[in-house]
Image: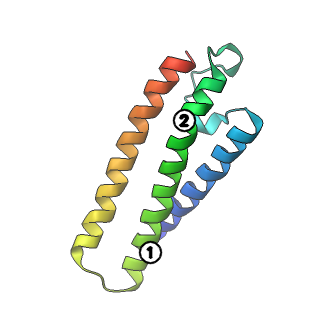
Amino acid sequence: MFVDALFFFAGFYMLVLTVKMKKTGEVSSQLIGKKIDLNKVKDLPGYINVMYPVNLIFGGLLLFTSCLGMIKNIYSLPVWVDITVLGLYCFGIIFYGAVSVKNQKKYLM
């Protein structure tokens, strides 16, 4: 239950940062690697346009799976729900990491 709540707040925070990124045109340091100097990036608007939908989808996936996990903990749901939630977490983290690194190398380095 604690991990699900943690993922819920992480997903919510990611959505807030993503909307702020699109609105202000500035990328928060929590959404990019530590090695990237935002003063020396190649194409920040391009990165924002590419990563905006990806961040929204990943933040929404975190919210959805964490809510499903919390519901699973409150009610006795079948084991396949637990496996599905874990699979979505794993898929989402791997997919987001790969897409994020690829786009950071393409647009920011």
Left or right: 38 in relation to 95: right
Decide: few, some or many residues near mark 1? Use Cα within 10 Å; few <14, some 14-19, many ≥20: some
- Residue at x-position 49% and y-position 26%: 103
Q: In which quarter of the image is the C terminus?
A: top right
Neighbour tally class for label 2: few under 14, some 14-19, many 20 plus, Cα within 10 Å: many
For the N terminus, the quadrant is bottom left
Tell me: 45 left or right of 54: right
Residue farthest toward the bottom in the current orientation of the protein: 75
Q: Mark 1 points at which residue?
A: 70
Image point (28%, 72%), residue name: 81
Q: Residue 21 carries which label?
A: none
Identify the element where label 1 is drawn. helix
Amino acid type of the residue that numbered disc 2 sits on in the rendered structure:
Met
x and y percentages locating residue 62 in the rendered image: 47, 57
Q: In which quarter of the image is residue 31?
A: top right
Quadrant in the picture for residue 70: bottom left
Q: Position of residue 30 (x, y in %)?
A: 61, 39
Q: Which residue is labeled 2 in the image?
A: 51
Question: Relative to residue 17, is residue 86 depicted above or below?
Answer: below
Q: Is 57 placed above or below 65 here?
A: above
